[in-house]
Amino acid sequence: MTTKPIDLLIYNIGTLLTLQGSNGPRKGAEMSELSPITGGAVAIQGERIFAVGTEEDVRAQIAGMTIIQSIDARGQLVTPGLVDPHTHLVHGGSREHELALKLQGASYLEILAQGGGILSTVRATRTATEFELYQKAKRSLDIMLKYGVTTVESKSGYGLTLEDELKQLRVTQRLHETHPVDLVSTFMGAHMVPEEYKGRSDEYVQLLINEMLPAVKQQGLAEFCDVFCEHGVFSVEQSERILSAARDLGFGLKIHADEIEPMGGANLAGKLGCISAEHLLAASDEGLRSMQQAGVIAVCLPATSFNLRLKNHARARTMIEMELPVALSTDYNPGSSPTESMQLVMTLACLNLEMIPEEVLTAITINAAHAIGRADEIGSLEVGKLADLVMYNANNLAYLPYHFGINHVNTVIKRGNIVVSDGHFFSK
Ligand code: NIG
Ligand code: FE
């Protein structure tokens, strides 16, 4: 029997940030421990990591094995593939006209109450064909990949009828099957009350519970269910009904909680044991504590609070002090956060959430992986995990958020394949 070769060896890595050895999501001081290796290497077999450590150790472990291909990292920085745990990737149209309204002083909820905002994207998504939605989302996924993101969570929620929600979810499924980036699908029919149910939100909640959730489950199109719990959208009581029904069907639970008004969404996330709660700008100490006790991950979205020009931001420092694990995400969507760039999120997390670069990297790798139930496969560089990793045109982590607004990624390896090389798509 011949031993299998090493398909890819990355060597001469200046700083290799492995994030190895997490026992659950990282919290408190653990968030700044990245298990770094100076002078590292990673050996890959098939789509998984075969060996990772100092170059000396790795070369000793693979001595005598054939090495098919090698990459000289030239002393640069290597991290796990970035994970974006909260996006509204699949949608029709765009909303640049809202920029002027915003500059004239209209708030996000005011634009929404006038039938704009999410509702205008719902109209554009309903009229788009599945192929148009696929093409548009693919362009965004391509950008994400070039910016170092190898796994993305994608929510529906711009269809708001059973057929249109299924259409969005089928696009997500097809992207997962055809694009190098792995997708994790969330059903968010409870993103908004559609115009045809205006003033009858409880009837829409019944439709979600009785028809939409069971159909999505039956077709196996989503793993998680998310609800926008917000003033003028879904109340805490409605959110609880929807999420409880989703839990009974076997969905994992997520909630857009306490983004603008302090509604008690964080408390609900704790009460229901959601895997994650998102936004949280207005969450109370008590709400955050209830999340901490229930093991809920706080997903902070600093690009959204930046773009909505909100005066406050998620209280990441308080969260970290109270040992609540923090993840970060773009919240990529056509309204509150039209950006695919996790590198911009890194900068905003430092400047506006006052997180240090080490905490930020934890929040966009291992903790983000936990927030979408994938930490056994991705989020850190460990033997047996998927070989998803990123090499930068930088030799230290702080340089990435410091030199902002540009793409620092040089090479992306996804499931052992070189998918981006020298900043460009690469195929063998
Ligand atoms: O997470 N908050 C609700 N949903 C999105 C915004 C969607 C939109 O404006 O189209 C968010 O920010
Ligand atoms: Fe969102």
Image: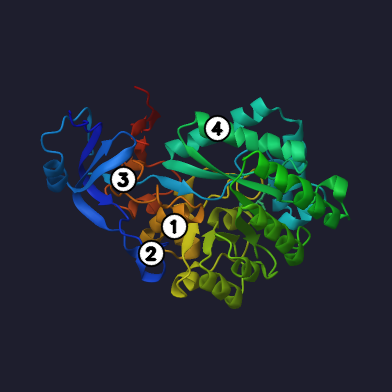
Foreground label between 1 and 2: 1
Residue 183 in percent (x, y) is at: 52, 40
CA separation, marks 4 and 3? 25 Å
N-terminal of the two: label 1 or label 2?
Answer: 2
**Residue that label 1 marks:** 367
Residue 402 point in image, percent of width and height: 38, 53
Element class at badge 1? helix
Gap between marks 2 and 3, in whole Å? 23 Å
The residue tagged 4 is 175
- Identify which residue is drawn at 35% across, 51% down: 380
* Quadrant placement of the N terminus: top left
Residue carrying label 3: 384
| Residues at circles 1 and 2 in contact by the CB criterion of under 8 Å | yes
- Which residue in the rendered view is the most extreme toward the front? 1
Kind of residue indicated by mark 4: Leu
Answer with mark 4 or mark 2, whichever residue precedes in sequence: 2
- Residues at marks 3 and 1, CA–CA distance in whole angstroms: 19 Å
Whole-angstrom CA distance, mark 1 to mark 2, is 9 Å
Q: Is mark 1 within 8 Å of ligand 2?
A: no
| Left or right, residue 284 beside residue 107 | left
